[in-house]
Image (cartoon, rainbow, N blue to C red):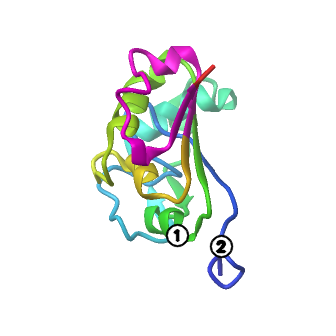
């Protein structure tokens, strides 16, 4: 359906701090994966405690399943992809994405390296020690503000 409607102009992404999930694609997701229902990894569920205060800090209130757009769908059908990361807990995720030369299934957020017109936008806390000299040129812009 996404392809039939001309794709996605701008895909805004975030990454899980603990396991690099992206759009609920868990570690190990295939590079060509499509939209589907997935069982959420325990780390993904824990990461979402910070994102959704309505869960009251109780991982038991976080859903066991989610709908993901799919790594392949993100890569193939977006005209531009922007990943936003903020806060010190995202430092490792930012470093792994900024240094990625291509997709690494163990850290799904690295798909950004293969997306059209990728940008990685981070705050100073998430940037940690990553500098523009550390990132690969084909990953796009690293902006820390």
Extent of the magenta region = 120-143
The residue positioned 48% from the left and 32% from the top of the image is 47
- Crowding near pointer 1: few (<14 within 10 Å), some, many (20+)? some
- Which x, y percent locates residue 60? 51, 36
- Which x, y percent locates residue 37? 50, 65
Of 92 and 42, nearer the camera is 92
* Front: mark 2 or 1: 2
- Crowding near pointer 2: few (<14 within 10 Å), some, many (20+)? some
Label 1 residue SS: loop
Give the labeled residue for mark 1: 35
Of 35 and 141, nearer the camera is 141
**Quarter in which the C terminus is drawn:** top right
- Labels 2 and 1: the sequence-earlier one: 2
Q: Residue furthest bottom?
A: 4
Label 2 residue SS: loop
Give the labeled residue for mark 2: 7
Q: Is residue 140 above or below residue 95?
A: below
Q: Is residue 15 above or below residue 108?
A: above
The residue positioned 39% from the left and 39% from the top of the image is 97
Of 45 and 141, nearer the camera is 141
């Amino acid at each position: 359906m996404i392809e039939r409607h001309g794709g996605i102009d701008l895909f805004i992404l975030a990454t899980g701090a603990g396991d690099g999930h992206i759009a609920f694609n868990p570690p190990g997701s295939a590079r060509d994966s499509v939209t589907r229902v997935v069982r959420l990894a325990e780390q993904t569920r824990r990461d979402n405690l910070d994102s959704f205060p309505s869960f009251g800090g109780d991982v038991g209130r976080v859903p066991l399943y989610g709908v993901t757009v799919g790594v392949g769908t993100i890569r193939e059908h977006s005209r531009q992809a922007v990943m936003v990361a903020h806060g010190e807990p995202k430092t490792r995720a930012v470093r792994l994405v900024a240094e990625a030369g291509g997709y690494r299934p163990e850290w799904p957020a690295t798909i950004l390296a293969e997306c059209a017109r990728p940008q990685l936008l981070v705050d100073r806390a998430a940037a940690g020690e990553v500098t523009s000299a550390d990132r690969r040129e084909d990953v796009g812009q690293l902006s820390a503000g």
